[in-house]
Amino acid sequence: MENQKSTSPQQLLQMRYTPNGVDEDNDDDEGEISRLGLPLEAIDADIYLDESVRENPSLYAHSGYAGSINMNDLSGGPISRKSSTDPKSTSTGKTASMTLKEQEKLIDELKNECFQLKLKIYYLEDRLGKLSPENVEEMAKENADLKVQLQIKLSELRQLKKLLREAHAAIRELQAQKNCDLQHGMTDEQEEEFRNAIAERLGLRAKLKQLAQMIEALEREMNAKDSEILQLQSRLDELDMPAEIIEDLKAKYEDQIGDLQDQLLEYQQNGSHMFDNPKADESWRTRCQELEHELAASQEELLQARSEMTTMNHYLEQQRDELSRARIDVAKLSRQLDGGRDQLHHIEDNHVNEMDALSEQFNLDMDDLRKHNEQLQDQCQDLGAWRDEDAARHAQQLEDIVAELDDRTSELAQLQDHLRDAQDHLRDARAMLHTKNATISKLEDQIKQLQLEISRHDADAAHDEAIAMKSKQNSGSLASLRADTVPLHDFQLISKDLAQSEDRNRKLESKLRVATDQRIAAERLNAEASDQIAELTNDLSDHNDRLRYYEEQDSQLSREIEARLKLTSDLESTKAQVMELLQMVEKNKAAAMEKTDLLDSQSREMDRLNVKIRKLDDAAATLEEEKEQLETELRDRATTIAMLRSRLAELELSKKQQDEESSGETTRTRTDLVDRNSLLLTILQHLESILGGDSRLDSNMLPKPSGNFGYFSNHLLSRLKSLSGLFVLFERKAKELETETVDQLTRFKKQMNMKLRQLDDFENTVNNAAERQKKWREQLIKKQAENEELHARLALLTKANTDLKGRSQSNDRLQDYETHYRQAERKLQLEKTRYTNAEDLWNARMRELEKRTKDAEEKVKRERQGNKERVASLMDDKAATQKNNERLQLQIAYQQEVIDLSRNMEPSQGSRTHSESQPEQELLKFNQLRNKIEQLSRTVDREKEKTRSANQNLEEFKAHSSRLEQQLEQRDEAIKSTLGSIHVRMSRVVMIFSDAIATLARCDN
């Protein structure tokens, strides 16, 4: 009897107080309950039998047999009653009409039962290990641990595989949607045609580029030929200048000779009149001599002029020969130029025809694209309507789920309250049960004593009956009557004693019945409380499963909504870009190239988006892994709690045995009570110190367990509840902190992307500056070549000047030329000095700029190691800069043509104006060079300012990034410290909670 009482509560606690609160084996429970029911029902049978014996004494001899029958019947009663209401027999018929949710629920319950069975095996092995040697115990423990870990890992593996499959399916769906969006619903043939059209356009673009290069080469050749023609014309003009001077001198001297001849004729006519007068004759003779001298001088001058004329004619013939050669060269060059122009016209015609064909093809393609775009717009509208419907449906579902979640949370809170109340009732019932068990044991001892007394009284009664029979037989004699007076008196005394004992027995029976009724009621309450706890735990597990299911659905819906929002935003952006492209095509046919570039950029953006999606998927996977880790930790904690509870049950049982063994040892109980009170006080003080508030109060103000234990227990439970609420609050705050840190991380990433874009812009500016440097260097080389040509022309002019000086020293024009030449030389020297100064300054600035650009390039290279993904954008920028360069080259060529035309127009104004305006032109050229150098210096200064600002931006960005990194490190440290403090506080709370449970168990015992 005692063994049955000691083992049955242990098994009930092991089976009912599992981690999920589900009964593991109903048959074992029924057996244990039936075993518990045996002694009470046997006692009832004995009581009923005693009453029947009193009423009918003839059945006294058969009392033992009847008691055994009643015991057997009563012991068999509850078993049959339990077996008739077996819940497992009804569960088989439901499986056929179950939904998927219910099947999943059933599978989860079965998994939980499997887990509980494994725990049961673990505890049974532990119990066996207590009876077996140390090695066998360790082996059994290791085997059980390995099995439990294997089952946990297998379940985690299945969940992970399931999640992986769902992730793969989601990725495939996203890829299919992306391909559909990229292809715009095109078939394979249409996609091939589209790709072939793009390839043809690229080939035509390459041909156009080749033709443009050929045209540029021909234009360069033409420009070179035009420059050669201009040089030859300038040489002709230079040669025509001295011939004109000689002709002027010849005309002048011929006029002088004619005048002298006229004067001679006059003198000859007037000679006859002069000889009549001697004074006049002398005067005329002197005059004639003078005239003869003058005539001789004029003849000498004439001879000199003729010699000069011959030399000049010879020079003129040479110059004419050179001119004829130059004209022949010019004719050849003009023929070559005409041929080149014909080729150019032919190429232009071919190009125009090809462009017309391309435009026609482009128009056809554009019509197809418009039709396709209209189809896409219709599809987009349908998709938008479907998306709106889907979004509305999802929003409705979300609202329903949120409402259901709120209801579930409220139900969960109510269930938790009910569970707490049930736990309180269970504790009270346990206390009552313990007290009732003690009273029952006392009553059983009293019943045994009474049964012994009754057996004695029965023996005395049998003896008295025998004496009575003998007294009836010997009733005639007085001696026998006198002898019988004493037994009759004794019989009266015995009857009185029997009546008193019967009264006592009735009182004890009434007490026993009351105690048994109370015990049965307590057991029923206990069973009902355990059933309620099991139901509540089942409901809790169901609610938790539903909550997890709804959370997963919510997360999936949020992901789908985000993906669809992204897709809709991408679709809207692509729509806007397509509309812009159509407008640009209608405005200008050349926008097709930009459209292809935009398509490439879209594909790059899609690749970037895919990269971002992959990153987000990786982050989601990491978060899921963290979630799974947390779930495994929670499971481990649940298992540890279950183990602690089972250990607690075992400790309770051992404590019961110890209490039963040491019932007479009051001193130990007092010390235990003192220890328990001190321990509970320390727990309460620790709780107060952790929670704060009441910790400032004096320790005497706190409730004590020795004064009013109920008030103390209520106060302790309220403090524990407040601690659990604080823990929940702390978890919420930790989650809020995590969300804030994640948001801040995203903000920091966006800022980093902005700064990286600024770096890319700075790289582009540096590259542009380098290209401008190259252009300026090329322009400098060209200007130096022009300067050398001007120097050569100056040398030729100086030679011509010296020749003219040697021939005609008394010429006024030569003096004017000399003065102009000197002024030009002075201006030239001034311009040379200015040019050298400017060139030195320019070189110094260029060196500084080169150094700075080198430093900037090094910095950019350092920063560029982490920015390799932006090579495509840099290539696009490079193509744009190349286009700008081509445009600038075309502008330069056009300006060169205008300059050449102005140069061609200048010689037609006349040789004199050309000879007079040549130094002025040189001065203008020098002024232009100076202006260009000043412009270049200004642009260099601007580029310097830009590089300075870019360097400042770089330094600010580096400082900002370092600050952000420091802030991130500080936040990481703060999060780690908070997590550590949470862990420490959780461990403290668990320790305090376990101590409180132990102390409460001791108090209950």
Image (cartoon, rainbow, N blue to C red):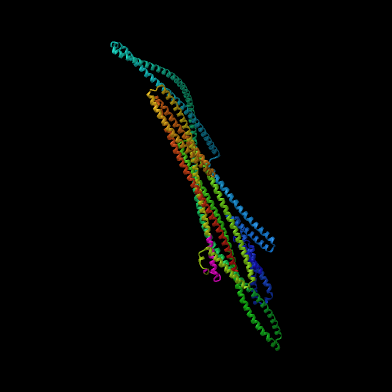
Task: Tell me if residue 81 can be seen.
Answer: no
368 vs 722, nearest the viewer:
722
Task: Tell me if residue 43 can be seen.
Answer: yes
Location of residue 105 (image quadrant)? bottom right
Q: Position of residue 493 (x, y in %)?
A: 65, 83
Residue 703 colored magenta? yes
Q: Position of residue 709 (x, y in %)?
A: 55, 70
Location of residue 666 (image quadrant)? bottom right
| Magenta stretch: dominant secondary structure | helix
Q: Position of residue 601 (x, y in %)?
A: 51, 41
The C terminus sits in image quarter: bottom right
400 vs 910, nearest the viewer:
910
926 vs 796, nearest the viewer:
796
Q: Is residue 718 left or right of residue 74?
A: left
Q: Position of residue 50 (x, y in %)?
A: 65, 75
Q: Is residue 780 left or right of residue 256?
A: right
For residue 466, above or below residue 788: below
Residue 629 colored magenta? no
Please state the extent of the stretch shown in magenta in the rendering: 701-727
307 vs 848, nearest the viewer:
307
For residue 961, above or below residue 680: above
Seen at 67% across and 70% down, the residue is 69
Location of residue 418 (image quadrant)? bottom right
For residue 936, above or below residue 492: above
Number of numbered callouts drawn? 0
Q: Is residue 848 left or right of residue 47?
A: left
